[in-house]
Image: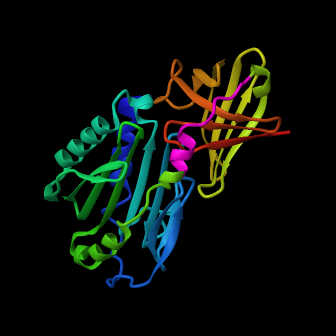
Amino acid sequence: MKSFVLAALLAAAVSAFAADQPQPAPGAPREFVDQALEPTGGKIKRPKDWFFTADHGRTSYAWILSREDAAKDHYTTGMRVQEMVSVHAATGQTPREFAAEFIAARKKAAAKIVKSSDEEKRGAFTRVRFETEEGKAHIAYTVYWGDEHLDVVAVVTAGTDKELWATYAPVFETMGDFQLLDIRKYEKAAAPDDVEVAPGQLTGHWRYTDDTGGVTSDYTFAADGTFTANIVQHGKVSWEWAGKWSLDGNVLHYEFTKSSLAQLPAGTKDSDKVVEVAKDYYVILPGDGHKRKFERVP
């Protein structure tokens, strides 16, 4: 999955800034409001008159704060915060290795590297910042990777037209002082007590709902060890897959036998740790430390 995950991150980093978009009226916003970044417990300053859009997947979270409505089309001026979770499980690379490959690819693709910083330690993360010119856009990247206890990479992409960079750079600087996740929430979740899970407890239809991103994920576990699953985003099915499931203690294993995404074909394997289970719900803890609660569907 390494090439798919990196390709998706590379595409997301640049596709938002369309070269043929009409130029926004100059004049940077002066008033900011607090914007929550759920479900990670993060927060960021958003210009009051800008749009906010969430775009989450199974192993990634993305939040877009933009002058134009990113939910309707590409945007010219804005910031995208994307967090990739369970990086080692998906790519076989450490967060540092994955981040280094992304940074090298973006610098190689740039028409011009405007500036670049050395590594900086920021709490549980290390970060590198650099700015590029790509087509008509001036783009600033900030790449974070977690330490040995945090299997996470985050990429912040802020950009606008080159002629407008001086106007919006102070806005991006204010927005750049954000909190990606509530580390106390992560630390509390990172070492849960082991629970006893029996296969019969998971048999049935379950649904995870992320209201902030308009995303639902359904799993149906059959008693014969097979499952079906899908992800629905904004009312449309974005992925359907099926396969075999099994339990090893409280670790739930999946092996795909069918998939509607060529990038995640039959044969793909994955796993989640079950940290809580009851009659009407169960809770998993992926590598990013953000619990997800699946509720039984009648």
On-image quarter of the N terminus:
top left
* Residue 279 appears left or right of 272: right
- Viewer-nearest residue: 49 or 262: 49
Start and end of the magenta stretch?
185-197
Residue in the picture at 35% in, 73% down: 174
Taking depth in this image into account, of 11 and 59 the one nearest to the observer is: 59
Q: Quadrant of the C terminus?
A: top right
Q: Position of residue 151 (x, y in %)?
A: 42, 38
Residue visible at 53% across and 20% down?
Answer: 266
| Residue 225 falls within the magenta-colored stretch | no
Q: Position of residue 173 (x, y in %)?
A: 30, 71
Q: Is residue 254 above or below residue 207?
A: above
Q: Give the residue at x 40% y 64%.
A: 178
Res 225 quadrant in image = top right
Residue under the image location 36 percent in, 77 percent down: 24
Pinpoint residue 50: horizontal percent, then vertical percent: 47, 75
Instruction: State the image coordinates of residue 124 (x, y, percent, origin top left).
Output: 37, 48
Q: Residue furthest top?
A: 224
Left or right: 133, with 127 as reference point? left
